[in-house]
Amino acid sequence: MTTDEITIKYHLGFDPHPSQQDAIFYTGMGCVATVEYKGFQVDVYCDGETRANLLDAPQGEIVSSLFSPTDFIDAGIDTDDALKLANDQELLDWINNSWFDLYCFGEHLDAVEHELDEALKVAEVYLRDRAHSEKIINGEFDFSE
């Protein structure tokens, strides 16, 4: 179907919560979404592994190690704001972090973002550019516009 609209299909089994944009909330989920525009599509993946040590504030000792979205949520770090606060209070010692990246039919596009809404915006720009380039290649673009 050809449309002027961007469509996003999530592969999570749920729609992402607006307060959970950081990649840590999607670690291990693989292909998070497919973005489509005018017959072109790109997949948004959550790549990498997450590992952070949760520290107690006074002593700086490790309370627990956090690997999955559930680990963070169970530790009370269940929103982007809570994650920022924990970072600001130096309660997290980061070992690894995950990120979002784009793939087009398996080809890695190296378009790294750390928040889902930003990754979706980059996907949209990529697809609009692809569609525009296709029009030029096919001689369908009116350069007088």
Image (cartoon, rainbow, N blue to C red):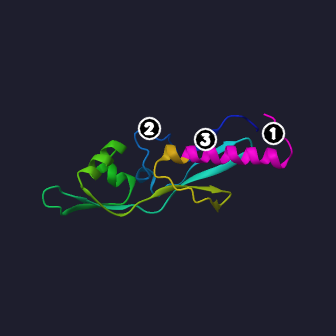
- Marks 2 and 1 in Cβ contact (< 8 Å): no
Apparent side of residue 49 relative to residue 2 in the rendered image (left or right): left
Magenta stretch: dominant SS?
helix
Which label sits in the foreground, 2 or 1? 1
Residue at screen point 56% across, 43% down: 121
Residue placed furthest toward the left: 58
User: What separation in Å lies between label 2 and label 1 (alpha carbons)?
Assistant: 39 Å
Q: Amino acid at mark 3?
A: Ile
Q: Residue 44, image x and y in percent?
A: 57, 51
Query: Which image quadrant: the C terminus?
Result: top right
The label on residue 8 is 3
Residue at 18%, 57% in the rendered image: 56
- Residue 61: percent from left, percent from top: 18, 63
Sequence-wise first label, 3 or 1: 3
Disc 2 marks a residue whose amino acid type is: Pro
Instruction: Report if residue 7 lies within the magenta region.
Output: no
Task: Tell me which residue sits at (85%, 47%) in the image.
Answer: 138
Of labels 2 and 3, earlier in sequence is 3
- Quick check: 133 left or right of 78? right
Residue occupied by mark 2: 18
Q: Nearer the viewer, residue 82 or 31?
A: 82
127 is within the stretch colored magenta: yes
Q: 107 above or below 2?
A: below
* Residue 143 tag number: 1
Q: CA distance from mark 2 to mark 3?
A: 15 Å
Q: Which portion, as a residue range, is magenta?
A: 120-145
* Amino acid on which disc 1 is placed: Phe
As drawn, the residue found furthest toward the right would be 139
Judge left or right: residue 20 versus residue 140.
left
Above or below for 54 versus 124: below
